[in-house]
Image: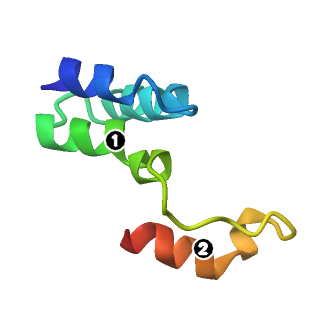
Amino acid sequence: MIDRAGGWIEPYWNAKHLRRTADWLLVLEPDASETLQLAALTHDMERHFPGGPVPDLTVPPEADLAYRRVHSER
């Protein structure tokens, strides 16, 4: 399943970020379950699909609370 998810994320412009998150998970928790590995590997994939929230680029990311809320709920 991890290999299939790795292929699924490839078209995403920020796939490297997703792969690095999964890599760091295994550094921090070498025995992480497949479920947790999948969550790490796919955690931002909602950004890849049209119709999602759009960040306000006029403010620092940490200050864009509306975007962060919608992103986390989607």
Give the residue pinned by disc 1: 42
Q: Are marks 2 and 1 in contact (CB under 8 Å)?
A: no
Give the vertical position of 64 relative to 60 (above or below). Answer: below
Instruction: Please name the amino acid that badge 1 sits on.
Output: Thr
Indicate left or right for 50 with 37 as reference.
right
Alpha carbon separation for disc pair 2 and 1: 19 Å
Indicate the colouring scheme. rainbow
- Which residue shows up at 48% across the image and 28% down it? 20
Q: Residue at x 49, y 63 (%)?
A: 52
Outermost residue to the front? 50
Q: x and y percent of residue 12 in the render?
A: 49, 32
| Mark 2 or mark 1, earlier in chain | 1
Residue 67 on image: x %, y %: 60, 73
Give coordinates of residue 66: x percent, y percent. Answer: 61, 82
Q: Which residue sits at x=49%, y=29%?
A: 15
Task: Count residues near mark 1 (Cα–Cα under 10 Å), then give few for <14, some for 14-19, many for 20+.
Answer: many
Residue at point 14%, 42% (across, down) = 35
User: Secondary structure beneath disc 2?
Assistant: helix
